[in-house]
Image: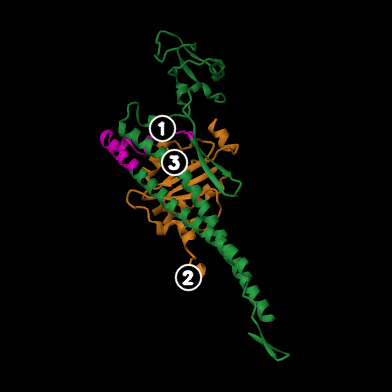
Chain colours: A green, B orange
Amino acid sequence: MDFAIHNSQSRTIVYAKMPPPLFTTRESEGSSTLLDEKLLRFMEQLELLEEKRASLNSLIEQGWFSMSKARYSMGNKHVSPLQYASEMEPLVLVHAKTLDSGELDFSTERFEQKCCKEVGADNRSIEEIGPQEKGVRRRIKPKEDITKKAVNEETSSENAPEVTPVTKSDQNLQQDPLKWFGILVPQSLKHAQLSFKQVLELSAEIATLQTAVLSTRQELKHSKKHKHEEASATQLDSVAD
Amino acid sequence: MTRYFAMAGRGKLIAVIGDEDTCTGFLLGGIGELNKNRKPNFLVVEKDTSITEIEETFKSFLARNDIGIILINQFIAEMIRHAIDGHMQSIPAVLEIPSKEHPYDASKDSILRRAKGMFCAEDFR
């Protein structure tokens, strides 16, 4: 603190010069408030992430429990990788979109099992049992001739019958994985499948939260660094004065 | 049709590296892709599966541009922790999941360690 003494007519006035503040109050308040907001957001995201994690873990355990029950009724080797199909197509995909805020958002898209007519580009030999016609029944008609037709003829029928004809082309890849384990599967295996489907949707939400948490963490780091740089720059200025 | 969408970038696959039960469960959920033209998007880790194979599969999943999320049992993730810690990109996202014999431990999760670590008293001034 500097002092200056001014003597005027019979009055002595002492001026005290206060040192300048380390950094302007408004700037420090602004950057601190911003930091606080980011920190709060980070904590909220972490809390939400841990909640969703707990749900995910319990759903997975539920799925395993149902699978074990299915294994108990079907036999040990009937619910195992031995049953996997030799070819498979995914029924669920994940989309990653970048939002306006710059954050990534994951969302799942599930495809419903389509009947064999959808396989337009499939050029594998298809053997059909029974003629293709509108309203064809699922039941195989043994008296009819077994003819070999190209798949394009299948797809040409605009008004597809509601019932899928039983043909070898049903071995199309978009098959419900439940069918790998047999035609009649126990209810517990269906419950297991349902649990894992829910797990997949939750996984996308968790992936979104994870990336959000990491990006908020980075923002926090940069804001703190910026604040410290501002503070040290202002300190240096005041020392120079 | 699904393959077209995955390759055209309109949708990405979900990959899984896990034990038998984990892979069976997720494949039941419908994520599996297996055909002679492309490598599978899953790896069943058994007792005799080498760490090299696991690491190579994980790195191959990272290198593919059609995988959005990789699900991996945490006990397997521990075996290739250095590879997982080295993955800094947002896509594919890596999610560590529990296994039947090894429950989930948040303190081992790479993402959470990265998020919570580096905090010290200085940071809160």
Give me the C-alpha separation between circle 3 and circle 1.
Answer: 15 Å
Residue drawn at point x = 46 percent, y = 27 percent:
A113
Tell me, for residue A200, which label it has, or none: 3
Would residue A144 be seen by someone viewing this image from the given angle?
yes
Query: Residue A140's spot in the image, x, y percent?
Result: 40, 13
User: Magenta includes A159?
Assistant: no
User: Is disc 2 in contact with disc 3, using a CB cutoff of under 8 Å?
Assistant: no
Relative to A84, is A110 on the left or the right? right
Badge 1: chain ID: A
Residue drawn at point x = 56 percent, y = 62 percent:
A33
Q: Is residue B100 above or below residue A73?
A: below
**What's under tag 3, amino acid-wise?**
Leu
Looking at the rendered structure, whether the residues under marks 3 and 1 are on a common chain is answered as yes
Foreground disc of the pair 3, 1? 3
Q: Give the overall secondary structure of the magenta segment.
A: helix
Give me the C-alpha separation between circle 2 and circle 3.
Answer: 38 Å
Query: Residue A101's spot in the image, x, y percent?
Result: 60, 49
Residue A122: which quarter of the image?
top right
Residue underneath mark 2: B121
Q: Which residues are magenta?
A: A62-91
Of callouts 3 and 1, which one flags the residue occurring earlier in the amino acid sequence? 1
Relative to A235, is A128 on the left or the right? left
Residue A29: which quarter of the image?
bottom right
